[in-house]
Image: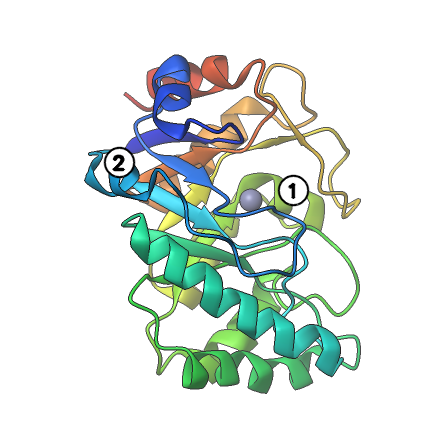
Amino acid sequence: MLIGAHIHGDDPISDASEVGAECIQMFVGPPQSWRKPPPRSDADRLKSSSLPIYVHAPYPVNVASPNNRIRIPSRKILGGTIERAEEIGAAGLIVHAGHAEDGIHRGFMRWRKVFEEIESPVPILIENTAGGTNAMGRYVDDLARLWEQINDFEVGFCFDTCHAHAAGEDLADVVDRVLAVVGKIDLVHANDSRDAPGTGADRHANFAVGQMNEDDIVDMVRASKSSAIICETPWPGIADDIAYLRKSLS
Ligand SMILES: [Zn+2]
């Protein structure tokens, strides 16, 4: 089990060693932008590094949106992000499940269209999300309905502990229920939360200060049987989160 960090800085490899990360996650362009990420000058260096690298899609992406002016650019920027992710030898591309304001049943077909249109050399991992109405991936029951529609494609899954807490899922068995739906968890986002359970708020916290029980986080990570774990917690304190997980899981 490799334990690492989401890196925001310009030099991902040295930032990783600074906090003891054995794998990393990063954005390949500005996280709030709709524009195709520009080529990275460090692409060759990242590709030849032994560090497994996961790429997070930009935040505005919502492939399940009923709005053409969001859905179509979302697919487009996903394609552009995949191109850059391939150039750095990424192990996976994480995309939030998104939401369909006109009803989640309508979002399933829009997700199908993504896999029909985009042939990605980089595995696409759909991530559970924290809150909102008509969210495709807030509750395990909805993920089950989504997976029924897309499981004939190669689809991976990323499980976020903070999002499951924010969704109000029962943390004691949520990972088992997720595994029953998706088959395999390819990546875990191990995060604590600044907020109470079930609030839908997506505000990550370091393990020492968040409102979640640290044992619950460790138990979920262990139950996931995932080979890679990424902490997306605030940078000051992330080295302690990584060390805590490593110690607890050894
Ligand atoms: Zn996450």
Left or right: 137 as drawn, with respect to 168? left
Task: In the rendered view, tell whether residue 124 sits above or below residue 245.
Answer: below
Among numbered discs 1 and 2, the one appearing first in the sequence: 2
Pinpoint residue 107: horizontal percent, then vertical percent: 64, 80
Q: Real-space Cα distance between discs 1 and 2?
A: 37 Å
Answer with the quarter of the image where residue 225 lies.
top left
Does residue 94 appear anywhere in the picture? yes
Answer with the quarter of the image where residue 17 lies.
top left
Please, what secondary structure does the residue beneath circle 1 have?
Answer: helix
Please, what secondary structure does the residue beneath circle 2 have?
Answer: helix
Q: Give the label on residue 244, or none.
A: none
Residue placed under numbered mark 1 in the picture: 165
Residue placed under numbered mark 2 in the picture: 45
Answer with the quarter of the image where residue 234 lies.
top right
In-front residue for pair 101/244: 101
Pinpoint residue 64: horizontal percent, then vertical percent: 64, 75
Left or right: 108 as drawn, with respect to 45? right
Give the quarter the ligand 1 occupies: top right
- Name the residue type under label 2: Arg
Q: How is the image coloured?
A: rainbow
Residue at 65 percent across and 67 percent down: it is 62
- Name the residue type under label 1: His
Name the image quarter holding the N terminus: top left
